[in-house]
Image (cartoon, grey):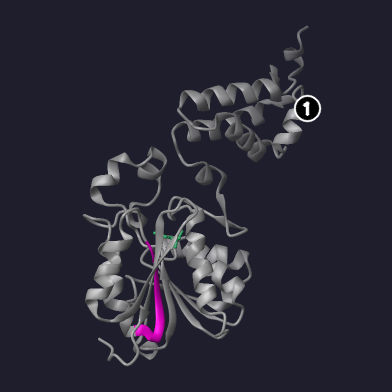
Amino acid sequence: MSARGFGIAVVPGNTIGALLTEVADTLKDADIEQPTLEAGWLLEFVLHLSPLMQRLRPERQVTVPEWASVQAVVARRANREPLQYVLGTEEFCGREFRVTPSVLIPRPESALLVEETVRRCKDNFMATVVDVGTGSGCLAVSVAATLPEARVLAIDVSPEALTVARVNMAQHGVEKRIDCFCGDLLSPLNDKLANQVDVIFSNPPYIAEIDWMALQPEVRCFEPRLALAGGRDGMDLHRRLLQQAPTYLKDGGVLLMEVGLGQAQVVCRQAEESGWFSTFEVLRDEGGIARVVCFERKAGGASL
Ligand code: GLN
């Protein structure tokens, strides 16, 4: 009698080694850039076996349920769903964040916003800082964890995003120190915060309409459009924040905004023309791209 007759729950001939090759081939056919690496990560996610152990034990048999689970996640990834949504997490500033299709996947260059916020608050431990468009909460959590005395407010227009942000805040033990608000840009802040805020930081949507179709399918088809599309030239939200921020910033308080390629100069010019800001600094990311603009509110100006 064949082994099958005894109901042995393995797929005949299917070992980790064979599965790895098959998954990598499927991902390669789907134009995934690093098929072998991602095959290892997807197998790790399902089998709880590190890529190193997979390589050390290529002859280990794969059971039928394991095989089915691997097929399910590989099908999602081959459909170009971002790996981070399939795995449910992404690392940012040394911490792991829960991500769902309701939130933008954190990008390494956004760490500049965290570093600059922390730098601007280093002599003022009790600073009040506001994260506009918190999404997964990755920026608010990273800032709150680094500045234990700071008062942090996190705003997002999407209630679904705030649900994810709250999970991340709890996960990293800062949920009691961050106040979450649902609403458009700074609109949820009340008058008591007028001229009280030290730093307003934001990674707003900044993809221009014309660039939309050129985005990778992972981004265009799966990440929230609300978090990506910034109007015709991609700078609608920057313009609106430039108008709203002076009301809440202290004299000398700072507005930090992430920008896309080629946008920094335009946003700096608009900040200058508004008449509300005194300094205009641009920070570059590791790729040399002007990525974050920093504007200091002029002292003494009346609020809007
Ligand atoms: N603040 C979040 C981040 O940096 C979300 C930004 C967004 O949704 N545009 O990831």
| Residue at screen point 55% across, 86% down | 126
> Which SS type dominates the magenta stretch?
strand
Quadrant showing the N terminus: top right
Q: Number of marks in the image?
A: 1
| 212 to the left or right of 285 | left
Q: Is residue 204 visible?
A: yes
| Residue at screen point 41% across, 54% down | 289
Check disc 1 and report the residue beneath it: 57
Q: Can residue 174 be seen in this view?
A: no
Residues drawn in magenta: 248-258
Q: Which of 50 and 195 is in front in this view?
A: 195
| Residue at screen point 24% across, 80% down | 275
**Residue 263 quadrant:** bottom left
Q: Is residue 56 on the magenta stretch?
A: no
| 252 to the left or right of 238 | right
Q: Is residue 7 above or below residue 172?
A: above
**Residue 40 quadrant:** top right
Residue 256 position, x and y percent, is 40, 70
| 84 to the left or right of 158 | right
Q: What residue type is labelled 1?
A: Arg
Quadrant showing the C terminus: bottom left
Q: How crowded is mark 1: few (under 14 residues within 10 Å), some or many (20 or more)?
A: some
* SS assignment at label 1: loop
**Residue 35 quadrant:** top right
Q: Which residue in the rendered view is the most extreme toward the top?
A: 1
Residue 292 position, x and y percent, is 41, 63
| Residue at screen point 64% across, 37% down | 46
Q: In this view, does 292 lie above or below 197?
A: above
